[in-house]
Image (cartoon, helix red, strand yellow):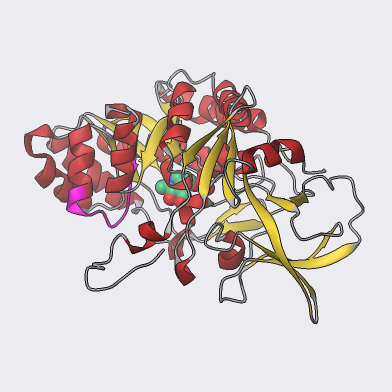
Amino acid sequence: MKKTSFLTLEKAKQIIEQIPTPFHIYDEAGIRRNAQALKAAFAWNPGFREYFAVKATPNPYILKLLGEEGCGCDCSSYTELLLAEAVGAVGKDIMFSSNVTPEKDMRKAVELGAYINLDDATHVEFLAEIAGDKMPDTVCLRYNPGGSFSLGNTIMDMPRDAKYGMTEDQMAGAINRLMALGVKNFGIHAFLASNTTTNEYYPELAAIMFRLAVRLRNATGCHISFVNLSGGVGVDYRPEQPCCDIAAIGEGVRQRYELILKPQGMDDIAIFTELGRYMLAPYGHLVSTVLHQKHIYREYVGLDACAADLMRPAMYGAYHHITVLGKENAILDHVYDVTGGLCENNDKFAIERSLPSIDIGDILVIHDTGAHGHSMGYNYNGKLRSAEVLLKEDGSFKLIRRAETPMDYFATLDMSEFALHD
Ligand SMILES: Cc1ncc(COP(=O)(O)O)c(C=O)c1O
């Protein structure tokens, strides 16, 4: 299927007049539509809630917008908790899914009254010590089933190699101890595969988690109040890739719920999700201008954006589709490496990609950067992190994060002995 941009050349030019490239831009209309479709897909479950994975796009304007669509915040660190608090998320609006958790982070999560998702059984005493007489009434436990996780004949991931979560026995022990400490309700959580583009991931994971819920209830007598399916629903980064059908996914989970939980009288369990990529990736573009062209053993197009703005291609060899604005219908009769300017040869947004003929000054849209895009940015080579822009439903736009300046880069240094001339 053809991948189209939510941005036209005309609109891009209008924005660039005020906000120079590179910048990430987010499509409010798309984000809202998608969040509503997710909610509709799980409407059969009265307690359903998406806790948006803040790490994917930690911008308060995005969190606020998703909050208006009913989403909570899934935080993994102290700073993300501060961000969630700043946008008005309180108590059970927050899921705190961390690992190797520092005391300061756990203390903040307790203070906020967040749902706390423990990554390990040893964290029970850690939590108890911090919470004292303010032990939460509900605690979530992260599961690691070990072995390999497969769908059909395809191995999706290797939980046995993952650092996250605890074994079933450890979970049962943790639940017994937590009940002795006064905890009344439990959540269970697992994240077994990332960026899945099959409709079967959540339903299969749900079946594993629902059976686990029954066994844990039978073993300990505990009340399980929610199952957190975490993130992992993917997006079609490549135009030819299949795209998840969220309605089919919701229906698949419902069928497992009816089959496994209902006969056990456990149909008061709420389903929670912690999606990041699925909520935002397709609704973000990295917009960049062509600075240079170079003709050596290959044809190179050099952009004003680099891997510091979008790390996924350099880090994982990830594919991100590229549209040359204004040349959407041109023939793809040129082959380019599309690069940034980092002193790293892996700073390539595309390798030997068929594209239309590109000129210096052309504006390129790099697709699907709305999640794990700007947030993974860094400052290597003194590159400065780009701006973030929200394209509103009415077609207007708002700068929701300015681009970094050299002074931001130097802000954490004591420069009092040196002279800067910006
Ligand atoms: C605990 C947890 N929840 C949710 C997510 C979001 O995952 P995704 O963006 O793949 O949906 C992540 C991603 O790393 C995670 O670690």
Which quadrant does the N terminus fall into? top right
Residue placed farthest to the bottom in the image? 297
Front residue of 84 and 416:
416
The residue depicted at 84 percent of the width and 45 percent of the height is: 328
Instruction: Say which of 243 and 176 sits in front.
Output: 243
Count up the numbered dots.
Answer: 0
Would residue 419 appear left or right of 34 to someone viewing this image?
left
Q: Nearer the viewer, residue 196 or 35?
A: 35
Q: Is residue 329 above or below residue 31?
A: below
* Residue 165 within the segment the image draws in magenta: no
Residue 203: in sight, yes or no? no
Q: Is residue 106 left or right of residue 162?
A: left
Where's residue 342, x and y in %? 56, 71
Q: Please name the residue shown 63% across and 43% down the image.
A: 16
For the C terminus, give its image quadrant. Answer: bottom left
- Residue 364: x and y in percent read 72, 52
Q: Nearer the viewer, residue 141 or 417?
A: 417
Tell me: residue 279, above or below residue 45. below
Q: Residue at x 64, y 47 (%)?
A: 368
The part of the chain drawn in magenta is 96-104
Q: Position of residue 316 (x, y in %)?
A: 59, 65
Camera sees residue 162: yes
In this view, which residue lies farthest toward the left?
133
**Quadrant of res 268:** top left
Q: Locate residue 340, reporting x and y percent.
A: 62, 66
Q: Is residue 274 above or below residue 161?
A: above
Q: Which image quarter: residue 74? A: top left
